[in-house]
Image: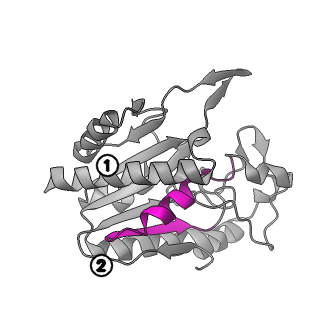
Amino acid sequence: MTDAFEILGIPQDRGVLIVVDHASNHVPSDIELGIAPELLEQHIAYDIGVANIARYMSESRGYLAILGTVSRLVVDLNRFSDEPGVIPQQSDGVVLTGNAITGIQRDARLDRFFHPYHGRVAELIQDMDPALVLFLHSFTPQLRTNGAEEKRPWEIGVLYNEYETASRLAIQHLEQEDLVVGDQQPYSGKDLHATMKSQAEDIGKAYTEIEIRQDLVTDETGQRRFAEIVLRMCEKIRTGLA
């Protein structure tokens, strides 16, 4: 494990690379965000459940996972490096006073976390030539809109940008698993796609992005269940792409 990433599993040519941008809620001791500590246990800090799902998946032959090791409140790895939101000033209405930093401090934080992480993802893709790159996230069961809670019915969502082939295979398989599947839900991969675009689409790699509803993966039972589901999905995609 480094400041920027953790790698799990054994690399294999034409295997599956699992990329988890928001795996951790860790904030290094030398970074002060200026928020209440309990907020680090909420979705604004990380994608609940996905780190362990990636760990369980990486126990299978041919599956390698790379996990971001800092909270997205420190640096959001699913952004382009020149986006203002890469070091967020607020999240879900919470103001991050500690992220009001200078340009030099911003560059230093990107050099510490963002660039090493994305550099290592790029190296793994080059070295492994994966048959599939899986981007793994989770989403909240409710969306707050104008003070009201709107329930999200999807149990799992499939996101993509311009490349759709692997995602269409993913949707087909997940529906066969009797899941409520969102096609570009709970939001569209065309709106938020920095990592999938730069690390897969722009270089012609087959990919899909999966979002799992967090209330289904808060404990080991749910995490292991979805690890098995997503493993089966990946194998169906690999077969379909062959």
* Residue behind mark 2: 127
At x 59%, y 42%, the residue is 214
Considering depth in this image, is 161 or 99 the residue closer to the camera? 161
Q: What stretch is highlighted in magenta?
A: 44-69
Q: In this view, does 202 lie to the left or right of 191?
A: left
Q: Can residue 202 be seen in this view?
A: yes
**Does residue 184 sit above or below 106 in this rendering?**
above
Q: Earlier in the sequence, mark 1 or mark 2?
A: 2
At x 50%, y 43%, the residue is 212
Of labels 1 and 2, the one closer to you: 1
Q: Is residue 194 left or right of residue 2?
A: left
Of helix, strand and loop, which one carries label 1? helix
At x 70%, y 44%, the residue is 91
Quadrant housing residue 59: bottom left
* Residue behind mark 1: 233
At x 48%, y 61%, the residue is 54
Q: Can residue 83 be seen in this view?
A: no
Considering depth in this image, is 219 or 10 the residue closer to the camera? 219
- In the rendered structure, does residue 51 fall within the stretch colored magenta? yes
Quadrant occupied by the C terminus: bottom left
